Image (cartoon, coloured by chain):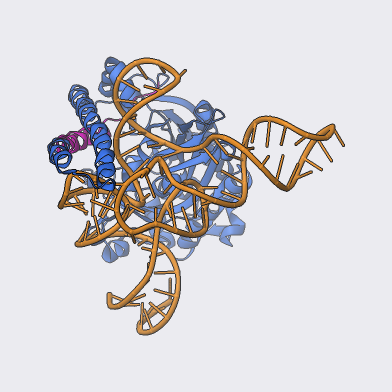
RNA sequence: GGAGAGGUGGCAGAGUGGUCGAAUGCGGCGGUCUUGAAAACCGUUGAAGGUUACGCCUUCCGGGGGUUCGAAUCCCUCCCUCUCCGCCA
């Protein structure tokens, strides 16, 4: 959530940020509601002050066994007036909050300008030794490989739940599990994260806290009778661990890492990237989340990206890092780097990670604060990044490490986890 | 799922219609004492909003709504926690 004070004082900047994100500009409406809201608060508060004084007086009269009726009759009018003002305030305030929650985070001033994903900036490319993107070798794609080796069964997954719900079989299932465990252990042991395992369903408050609601409502699976959502990412439960808390300054920075399945309806993207793992309704992901002091979030984002990259270097998988331009930033993000892995079978880059700095945007929505040295509670900055999502990572892994005879060589760091060196 | 009990400040725990933002204890912070520390004693110690100034006002006792001149206290509703029973990985 954006700071109302910023909105009041710099409406032009806010409008520019909204425009850069190609979001709906409701700034003027918010400002007029804010003005009305403050008028009502002032009027009501003044009357309440009166009421409190008179109320005390009535108490005194009663105790002295004097006639309090005239005072009570008079108070009735004041009370009615307060009720009317509070009723209107409630309406105005609800609308005000609703609109405020719909304002996206503003792009960070260092985020590249741009009008679409075409303006994203490639920051780096990492290729394994001896690997070339122009390799003219014939690569089988992951769907073909998975079928031949009997490790992925998309047809039966579809039978069980529907298209986009993958079924892993045999060494496929075990490789997936190995991958997840390897990534989690790497982040815990080498990068200093603390592991969490969270609920995979979350309530509307949590979804609003991280910014999935209200905007992404149609992209989530919802369990109507319990008013719960299946999480689209572990970012939601992990960030909400500290919702409505004031943390001790000494506890920061906090770095959590956790596995979760992710559920996405992918509404509106039917027919796009439908093959195999490219776009699925359920996938596995290891997520990293950080809570830091405001002055540390810039550096924390760099570390987050590096922690994710580390996985790919260890697995010897080609990747590149992209910085998203303002127009391509998600609703809550101020700055974001995507990591894309190379798919030799598809001959294209696949988004396998997204590392974002939200500044105080989520913290404000979820009320996550810390007590600073001078004793005043302040909002933390939150960040998160995939480290990484296995679905697309699995595509790159299988295709990149396939052998000339149609098998797959398991990257060295995964062998102990998997219990085998090759799939053939 | 059924029955019961309960949700109050960082924690524990009083408070059943008016002087209650809320006793008391613990913890935290500051001070006195001390060579230093402990103990003891004294003081202080929540958040949000409004106004704007460093003062005043308002709100907040699980969430929401209501009754009343006035609600932590009464009513309705939802959520959560605990105990017992049932079911179950």
Residue A95 colored in magenta in the image = yes
Res. B41 image quadrant: top right
- Image position, residue B88 (x, y; %): 39, 79
Nearer-the-camera pick, A389 or A365: A365
What is the magenta range? A85-108
Number of marks in the rendered image: 0
Which chain is blue in the picture? A
Judge from the rendering whether residue A314 lies leftward or rightward of residue A160; answer left or right. right
Judge whether A168 appears above or below A185 on screen.
below
**Quadrant including the N terminus of chain A:** top left
Task: Please say whether residue A138 is visible from this viewpoint.
Answer: no
Residue A56 colored in magenta in the image = no
- Image position, residue A364 (x, y; %): 38, 35
Judge from the rendering whether residue A284 lies leftward or rightward of residue A251; answer left or right. left
Nearer-the-camera pick, A205 or A132: A205
Judge whether B87 appears above or below A377 on screen.
below
Q: Residue at x 53, y 31 (%)?
A: A375
Judge from the rendering whether residue B6 lies leftward or rightward of residue A301; answer left or right. left
Magenta stretch, main secondary structure, is helix
Res. A307 image quadrant: top right
Task: Please say whether residue A305 is visible from this viewpoint.
Answer: yes
Nearer-the-camera pick, A364 or A151: A364
Res. A316 image quadrant: top right
Q: Residue at x 37, y 62 (%)?
A: A167
- Image position, residue A335 (x, y; %): 41, 28
- Image position, residue A106 (x, y; %): 34, 25
Which hue is chain B drawn in? orange
Nearer-the-camera pick, B50 or A357: B50
């Amino acid at each position: 959530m954006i700071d109302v004070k910023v909105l009041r004082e710099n409406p032009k900047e806010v409008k520019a940020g909204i425009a850069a994100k190609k979001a709906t500009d409701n700034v003027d409406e918010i400002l007029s509601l804010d003005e009305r809201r403050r008028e009502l608060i002032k009027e009501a508060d003044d009357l309440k002050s009166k009421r409190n004084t008179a109320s005390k007086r009535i108490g005194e009269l009663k105790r002295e066994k004097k006639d309090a009726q005239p005072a009570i009759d008079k108070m009735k009018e004041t009370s009615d007036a307060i009720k009317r003002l509070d009723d209107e305030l409630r309406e105005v305030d609800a609308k005000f909050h609703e609109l405020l929650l719909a304002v996206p985070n503003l792009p960070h001033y260092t985020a590249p300008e741009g009008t679409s994903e075409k303006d994203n900036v490639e920051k780096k490319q990492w290729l394994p030794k001896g690997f070339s993107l122009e390799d003219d070798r014939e690569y089988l794609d992951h769907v073909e490989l998975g079928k031949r080796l009997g490790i992925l069964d998309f047809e039966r997954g579809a039978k069980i739940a529907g298209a986009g719900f993958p079924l892993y079989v045999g060494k496929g299932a075990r490789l997936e599990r190995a991958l997840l465990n390897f990534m989690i252990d790497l982040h815990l042991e080498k990068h200093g994260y603390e592991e969490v395992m969270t609920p995979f369903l979350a309530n509307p408050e949590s979804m609003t806290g991280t910014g999935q609601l209200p905007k992404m409502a149609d992209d989530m699976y919802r369990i109507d009778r319990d008013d719960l959502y299946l999480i689209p990412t572990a970012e939601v439960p992990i960030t909400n661990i500290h919702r409505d808390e004031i943390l001790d300054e000494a506890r920061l920075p906090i770095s959590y890492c956790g596995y979760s399945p992710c559920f996405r309806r992918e509404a509106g993207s039917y027919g796009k990237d439908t093959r195999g793992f490219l776009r699925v309704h359920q996938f596995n992901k290891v997520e990293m989340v950080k809570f830091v002091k405001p002055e540390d979030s810039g550096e924390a984002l760099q570390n987050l990206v590096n922690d994710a990259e580390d996985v790919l270097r260890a697995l010897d998988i080609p990747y590149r890092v992209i910085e998203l331009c303002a127009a391509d930033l998600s609703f809550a993000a101020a700055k974001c780097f995507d990591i894309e892995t190379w798919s030799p079978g598809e001959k294209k880059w696949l988004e396998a990670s997204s590392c974002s700095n939200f500044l105080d945007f989520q913290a404000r929505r979820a009320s996550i604060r810390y007590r600073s040295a001078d004793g005043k509670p302040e909002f933390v900055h939150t960040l998160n990044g995939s480290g990484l999502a296995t679905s697309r990572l699995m595509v790159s892994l299988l295709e990149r490490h396939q052998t000339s005879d149609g098998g797959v060589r398991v990257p060295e760091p995964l062998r102990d986890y998997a219990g085998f060196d090759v799939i053939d």
